[in-house]
Amino acid sequence: MNKLLFLAIVLLTAGCKEKFISPAPAVVTGYLVIEGVVNNGGGPTNIRLSRTSKLTDTAKKNETGALVQLEDNRNNKISFSETGKGNYSVANLQLDTSLRFRLNIKTANNEIYQSDFVSINNNPPIDSVNWIQDNNGVQLYVNTNDPTNSTHYYQWEYNETWEIHSGYYAILKWATKIGPNNTQLATVAYRDSNDAQIFTCYQFNASNNIIAGSSARLAQDIIHLPLTQIPANTRRISALYSILVRQYSWSKQGYEFLDRMKKNTETVGSIFDPQPSELNSNFRCISNQLQPVIGFLNICTIREKRIFIKNKDLLNWDYRAPCTDQIIPNISDSIKQKAIGTLPIMPVVVDPFGNIVSFNIASPLCVDCRLSGTNVKPIYWP
């Protein structure tokens, strides 16, 4: 009976469907998307231009060949340099905080986009990034305070880096030797300084959702906000972990744009969701008023803070790589039969002459950390 009722509901629903026609105008080239915050001092400014595409498209449509300029209300202009893949950059801006600025963009197909003039937002330094360990893992927080009580609207992004170690420390590598009748025999040899380091590597991750917070309804401009959680006993803090947090400040109008973007990205796929035309961008296409554009010019000093968490700082953080090894004799036929798809680790038995009689092997994922990360040590790593 339940199955029949379910079938009836499905048929009735299908029969009531009507074709949905989006109120947003169709644009063959897609909407221009403008991403990035203008950084007033202390580092480069990166603006990314792309075009909207279908959800089924896997490749992002970068907007190349554009002219990007920052203009103040005294008609002074600063040009950005194209750095590839739709990215445009300028280094170490030192803008006059008494002026207002807008961004001008001319695309390769001569479309002209322009933002409203905006002021530079005050952005206090990040007070701290802290963490708390509980039964679920490690929860990280950001803390910010503006003593002038004038900022109120914030956004954060973060980049994570963590050190990983292979399940086994290998001092052997595969080798060959010449046998009878000039045949090649499989064997092992000791790794040396010319071989790549394969025990310690690094993995990376970046925030991919919009993290925003406001103190506008509070008596003081103080923020304490959760950033991300690391599940208990995972590889991420099996040795050393670091997070770099970036803080941006926004105007009230910009924060409302950000909030709408957050809601859109969290509820993709419903015809009842707000459409791109409802985002209240402060950009417009002045060469074609009907051409939608997604983006919001925001200018502030980008604040950063990095912290490290050591495995030994945690209580009972017991990560164990799911690795097992096997011992085989150092005989060519045995190696060819039993060691396919593995890597050698350590000698197990060595004869009085220093010859390796047997050794252990394991899955490459347990021996060579480069299969999970990079062995290039970041410049900020201790």
Image: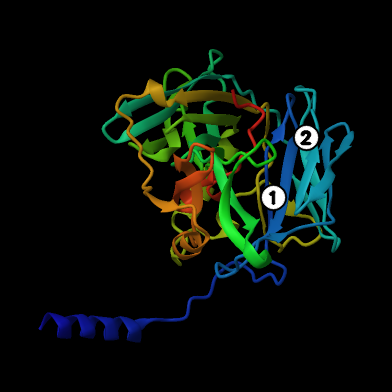
Residue 16's spot in the image, x, y percent? Answer: 34, 83
SS of the residue under disc 1: strand
The residue at the point 48 percent across, 76 percent down is 20
Going by the picture, which residue comes out furthest to the left? 1
Residue bearing the label numbered 1:
34
Specify the quadrant that holds the C terminus. top right
Does residue 227 appear in this view? no
Residue 51 visible to the viewer? yes
Question: Residue at (69%, 69%) from the top-left corner?
Answer: 27
Number of dots carrying numbers: 2
Q: Residues within 10 Å of mark 2 (few under 14, many from 20)?
A: many
Residue 244, image x and y in percent?
56, 30
Picture disc at residue 336? none
* In contact (CB < 8 Å): disc 1 and disc 2: no
Of labels 1 and 2, earlier in sequence is 1
| Structural distance between the alpha carbons of marks 1 and 2 | 16 Å
Residue indicated by mark 2: 101
Q: Position of residue 310 (x, y in %)?
A: 45, 24
Query: 366 or 28: which is nearer to us?
Result: 366
Q: Which amino acid does the dot numbered 1 rest on?
A: Ile
- Is 280 or 1 nearer to us in this picture? 1
Q: Amino acid at mark 2?
A: Phe
Under circle 2, the secondary element is strand
Q: Quadrant of the N terminus?
A: bottom left
Q: Residue at x 83, y 33 (%)?
A: 73
